[in-house]
Image (tube, rainbow, N blue to C red):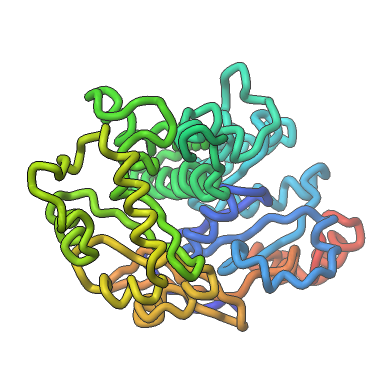
Amino acid sequence: MSATRSGPLTGVRVLEMAALGPVPFAAMMLADLGADVVLVDRTRDARASDDPALDVTKRGRRSIGLDLKDPRGREVLLDLVRSADVLLEGNRPGVMERLGLGPDECLAARPQLVYGRATGWGQEGPWAQDAAHDINFMAVSGVLHAIGRPGERPVPPLNMLGDYGGGGMLLAFGVVSAVLEARTSGRGQVVDAAILDGLAAMSALELAMQARGLQSEERGANLLDTGAPFYDVYECADGRYLSVGAIEPKFYARLCELTGFEQDLPAEEVRPQLDKTSWPDRKRAWEKLFASRSRADWCALLEHEDACVAPVLSWREAFEHPHNVARSTFVSPGGVPQGAPAPRFSRTPGAISRPACAPGEHTTEILEELGKDSESIAELQRLGIVGGRA
């Protein structure tokens, strides 16, 4: 039985081809906001017995196991396409075409279909077929070069910036935009969501600052890359850390006032906040000051003050932080901590409609919705065209 759904995308039907990285994250976001997402898993995965409960990126959807190399499996997928609004796939360019399930075939079956394609390099270009991961796309975008401290090697920001930010969120935004257009025009289209393109788009502020001469390509020497002493992470006496982001003059002044930083210096010796020549010395002075007290002491002094300071929390600490608890920022369905659906809507809130699914878990249910009887389903299962609970 289908779960009760809520959210602004209720009524939107999505097919998700099994993939890694941006596609499952985009599908999770769409499912959280009410879309009915069917995950098309491989039949060999549908035979697996692993417990899927901990794979929260698969929450909120149903799964069918299909052998898409068999013509009868491809026809089942095209049957699903005929009632879908969106198809998401994350294969290398040309894979879906070789299966006979590319945009031409799927749009012929469903002219209004939005065909969302997520890759790292994009659908064309000299590197389009090259194997790579999140870290590689960040490297070629220029973003990875900018993250890290001076004189040290760049630091990858987990997979959040590329796979999820420049990839999954860009894909979700793109397909929702195309669905809106299709409902007006009656015509679908292909959405080419490349992680590289997303990272370039997300670089807007940094590139604008470079164009205005406010930022150099030197790592760790700029306003937002730990070059500025008022935008960095500092270790406290107990080995824990504080984040400081006092960029605006009024916030910086309040931070200095509360901590006593440079308050005993004659006015003529205090350098302007944005005087880069003073940054290295001020960085060392801040390091010494913050190392003199525990993180808890600093939080007690600076919490709820307009000084832009917050503790650097571990995952477990973040789950328990009063603000996150008050907003239910993290939830624990089935005892598995995870982020709640976002963003939030005043009238049509999203929800986690069902837990993460096992490959092929809903095969029978989905085939029945296509009008197939029990004998047909049993035959497809016997031939290995479908997998899972058929």
Residue 164 coordinates in the image, percent (x, y): 51, 49
Q: Quadrant of residue 251?
A: bottom left
| Viewer-proximal residue among 347 and 310 | 310
Reply above or below: 284 against 97: below
Residue located farthest toward the left when viewing the structure as drawn: 267
Residue 330 coordinates in the image, percent (x, y): 47, 74
| Viewer-proximal residue among 98 and 120 | 120
Residue 280 at least partly seen: yes
Residue 9 at least partly seen: no
Reply above or below: 201 against 324: above
Q: Quadrant of the C terminus?
A: bottom right
Residue 366 coordinates in the image, percent (x, y): 67, 66
Q: Residue at point 44% right, 32% down?
A: 219
Reply above or below: 257 against 175: below
Q: Residue at point 47% right, 39% down?
A: 149
Q: Residue at point 25% right, 29% down?
A: 214
Residue 175 coordinates in the image, percent (x, y): 44, 46
Q: Quadrant of the N terminus?
A: bottom right
Image mark count: 0
Q: Residue at point 84% right, 59% down?
A: 380
Reply above or below: 70 against 297: above
Q: Is residue 98 left or right of residue 172?
A: right
Residue located farthest toward the top when viewing the structure as drawn: 126
| Viewer-proximal residue among 320 and 178 | 320
